[in-house]
Image (cartoon, rainbow, N blue to C red):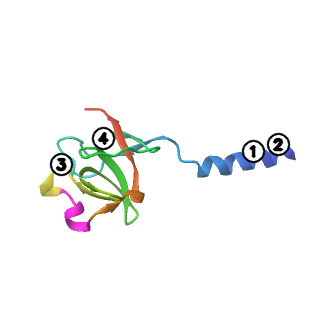
Amino acid sequence: MRSFILSKVEVLLAMTIKFPIQRFTVFGNSMLPTLKPGQDVLVWCWFLKLKIGDLVVFNRGGKEMIKRIHLYHGRSIFVLGDNRKESTDSRSFGWVDKSEIIGKVVSFNT
């Protein structure tokens, strides 16, 4: 019985712990030519030190998005897609709060 309880606790912990690296898939053309639709990126999710030019994944309205940091002011971040003509970004939905940032893109294949 004790091993069953421990395994249940371990499963609950695993479900609540955010892993430091996560994989995301790019959808849409907003990050062309840097990132292409269907391309996978690795995102670092712990202890973020963000700066202008970084690619970040954030949650906006229940949707995960990948954009580039254009401006940074305290906890507010202004993000833009690299493909300005086809990007829905801070120009349309406003500044992103730092709490909405899931992580920073650290690797992608070209």
Q: Circle 4 sits on which residue?
A: 39
For disc 1, the neighbor class at 10 Å (few under 14, some 14 to 19, many from 20) is few
Per the model, the C-alpha gap separating discs 2 and 1 is: 6 Å
Q: Which of the two labelled residues, at mark 2 and mark 3, occupies the earlier sequence position? A: 2
Q: Amino acid at mark 2?
A: Ser
For disc 2, the neighbor class at 10 Å (few under 14, some 14 to 19, many from 20) is few
Q: Circle 3 sits on which residue?
A: 82
Q: Secondary structure at mark 1?
A: helix
For disc 4, the neighbor class at 10 Å (few under 14, some 14 to 19, many from 20) is few
Q: Which of the two labelled residues, at mark 4 and mark 3, occupies the earlier sequence position? A: 4
Please give the range of residues in magenta. 87-94
Q: Residue 39: x percent and y percent?
A: 30, 40
Of badges 4 and 2, nearer the viewer stands: 2
Per the model, the C-alpha gap separating discs 4 and 3 is: 15 Å
Which residue does the image show at 41% across and 45% down from the upper left?
48
Q: Give above or below for 41 relative to 85.
A: above
Q: Circle 1 sits on which residue?
A: 7
